[in-house]
Image (cartoon, rainbow, N blue to C red):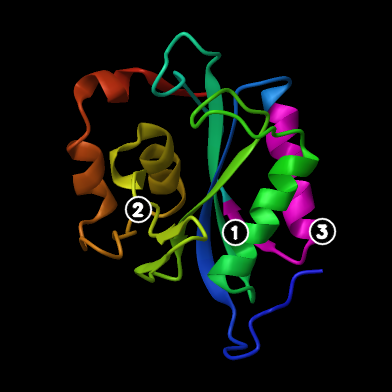
Amino acid sequence: MIKQDTSENQAKIVYLGIGSNLGNRRVNIDRAKFKLQKNHIQILKCSSNYESESWPDKKNPKFINIVLKIKTNLTALNLLKMCNSIEIELGRKQSKKNNPRTCDIDIIDYSQKVQTIEGKNLILPHPSMSVRNFVLLPLFEINQSWKHPKTKKNITKLIDSLPIKDLRSIKQI
């Protein structure tokens, strides 16, 4: 059982990205959502499924990705630990960075905080989210007024800055 944030009992609004490119991708994502809810995570909104090429190696199987808007009392670090635990429960193996995986859960935005916890692999907001089509498009679907916590750019500007090939290579399914 992961401890809740006792210093601030107020629930936080968080955006999570979930992706899968091994096995039954849709089932893997549904199972991740179910396990989050079993761990007292309230899902407020869920984007559609988006299929995109694997990054950085397009030869790997395509990903299905979603973005969730959730409410939690967990600290960012405890939420990360829970997400890592769920990934392992769903069959994720330790392997080379960006290799194919059954489940990947990333904290995209934790209550608009800008934070780095050295040695814990936690950087908020997610350091690459603003250049990834598979994060920005599903995030836009569930919150058109979202702004990047660090740069303060709104999501429309972030999407507009993506290369056209990135916009053409993703589809809502």
Q: Residue at x 26, y 64 (%)?
A: 150
Q: In the rendering, at what x and y percent does residue 74 appear?
A: 64, 73
Front: mark 3 or 2: 3
Q: Give neighbour class at mark 1: few <14, some 14-19, many 20+ (Cα, 10 Å).
A: some
Q: Quadrant of the N terminus?
A: bottom right
Sequence-earlier tag: 1 or 3: 3
Q: Residue at x 29, y 60 (%)?
A: 147
Q: Quadrant of the C terminus?
A: top right
Q: In the rendering, at what x and y percent does residue 130 appear?
A: 30, 45
Magenta part of the chain: 26-45
Of the residues shown, which amino acid type is indicated by label 1? Leu
The circle on residue 144 is 2
Q: Nearer the viewer, residue 91 or 110?
A: 91
Sequence-earlier tag: 1 or 2: 1
Task: Residue 24: name its quadrant.
Answer: top right
Give the structural element (helix, strand or loop) at label 1: helix
Task: Residue 38: name its quadrant.
Answer: bottom right
Of the residues shown, which amino acid type is indicated by label 2? Gln
Q: In the rendering, at what x and y percent does residue 3 appear?
A: 73, 76
The residue where tag 1 is placed is: 80
**Tally of numbered discs:** 3
Asked whether the viewer can see residue 44, the reply is yes
Front: mark 1 or 3: 1
The residue where tag 3 is placed is: 38
Of the residues shown, which amino acid type is indicated by label 3? Lys
Give the structural element (helix, strand or loop) at label 3: helix
User: Residue 102 colored magenta?
Assistant: no
Q: Nearer the viewer, residue 108 or 67?
A: 108
